[in-house]
Image (cartoon, rainbow, N blue to C red):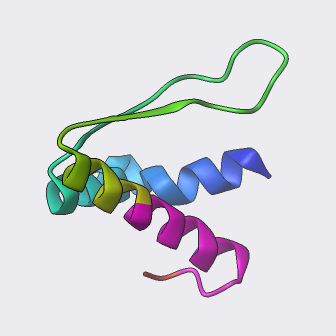
Amino acid sequence: MWDKLIGCIIGRQGTKINEIRQMSGAQIKIANATEGSSERQITITGTPANISLAQYLINARLTSEVTGMGAL
């Protein structure tokens, strides 16, 4: 399940994450999963406003995926 969710954030060839980076102005790094776990750490850096917007956009993508709307 986590792989599908991280996939919806990253998008095909990184298109979605690049969109979020561009819209928010924040730097976003997604770490590889640690061995034995499927969880991945997302690091967001920038101004407080950039970080807040990036968090909002990531959460919106996750919410749309979980609720089945898919496209955002």
Identify whether 30 is placed above or below 18: above
Residue at the farthest right position: 36
Which residue is drawn at the image coordinates 69% and 45% (left, top)?
A: 3
Residue at the farthest front position: 48
Range drawn in magenta = 56-70
> In the image, residue 71 lies at what x, y percent?
48, 82
Which residue is drawn at the image coordinates 21% and 52% (left, top)?
A: 50
Quarter assignment of residue 63: bottom right
Nearest to the observer: residue 59 or residue 70: 59
Question: Can residue 4 be found in the magenta stretch?
Answer: no
Identify whether 47 is placed above or below 55: above
Question: Can residue 64 be found in the magenta stretch?
Answer: yes
Quarter assignment of residue 22: bottom left
Nearest to the observer: residue 28 or residue 6: 28
* 44 displayed left or right of 71: left
> In the image, residue 37 lies at what x, y percent?
81, 24
Residue at the farthest bottom position: 69
Which residue is drawn at the image coordinates 58% and 79% (left, top)?
A: 64
* 25 displayed left or right of 10: left
> In the image, residue 40 lies at what x, y percent?
62, 31
> In the image, residue 56 lies at what x, y percent?
41, 65
Nearest to the observer: residue 45 or residue 33: 45
- Quadrant containing the C terminus is bottom left
* 59 displayed left or right of 18: right
Identify whether 5 is placed above or below 35: below
Magenta: main secondary structure equals: helix
* 31 displayed left or right of 62: left
